[in-house]
Amino acid sequence: MVEFLFESPFYLGGLGLVVTILTAYGWLQTGNTIALRSTVGLAMATVAFVALNIFVVTDREAIRTFLLDTASELQRNEATKVSARIHPEATQMVLDLEAQLPTIHFKTVRIKTFHAFDFTPARNPTSVSVRMNAVVEGERLGQQGTVPRWVRVTLEKYQGQWKIVDYDHREPHYEMLNEEGRSRLDTYRR
């Protein structure tokens, strides 16, 4: 419900418009003043909800923007800006990747699909695990390539900002596998 109210202005506006048009049609057919008041009230409520939807930024929207900005910084090879997005208590995997950033020349970094935002609000500070598909094209130590990957990034709020705590990647089809397939792929990877 929160997603519908705060993250989908087109759906909310469309629904409000349809209901407003139906009540306006009812008013035109009957001339009833209650239908007229309902039409005006619904039109005002629709405008108010769409405005609220546009101006309220949810955690999901902020995280999506954070990740898209991080991808843009990687594509522009701004390693220091990307390093500023890493949590001071990040896992060794993230720290190793951070150390490798200056040796990689990125040509393209694109997030293709966001699969899920798994929040753990009971934890203090708040953390979220984001599963997505990405494509990276670049060069490292004379080797060039394009690598499509399924990626899971764990973020945590640190001093009021989202920071990268953990990172994992697998084959691009990983999200589509059932539990048995994921288990086999995880076992094979180790």
Image: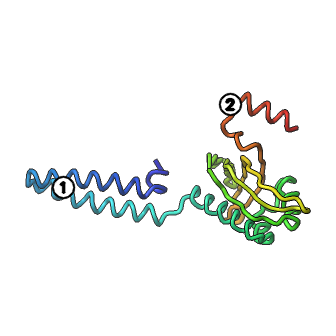
Q: As drawn, which residue projects farthest toward the top?
A: 180
Dot 1: element: helix
Residue located 61% across and 58% down the image = 64
Q: How many badges with numbers are in the image?
A: 2
Mark 1 is on which residue type? Ala
Residue 157 position in % (x across, y down)? 69, 59
Left or right: 121 with respect to 98? left
Q: Position of residue 156 (x, y in %)?
A: 71, 56
* Residue tagged 2: 178
Task: Give me the disc on residue 133.
Answer: none
Residue 180 falls left or right of residue 102: left
Where residue 178 sits, quadrant-wise, is top right
Q: Considering depth in this image, is 189 or 52 the residue closer to the camera?
A: 189
Q: Mark 1 highlights which residue?
A: 24
56 versus 18 height, above or below: below
Point out the frontmost of discs 1 and 2.
Answer: 2
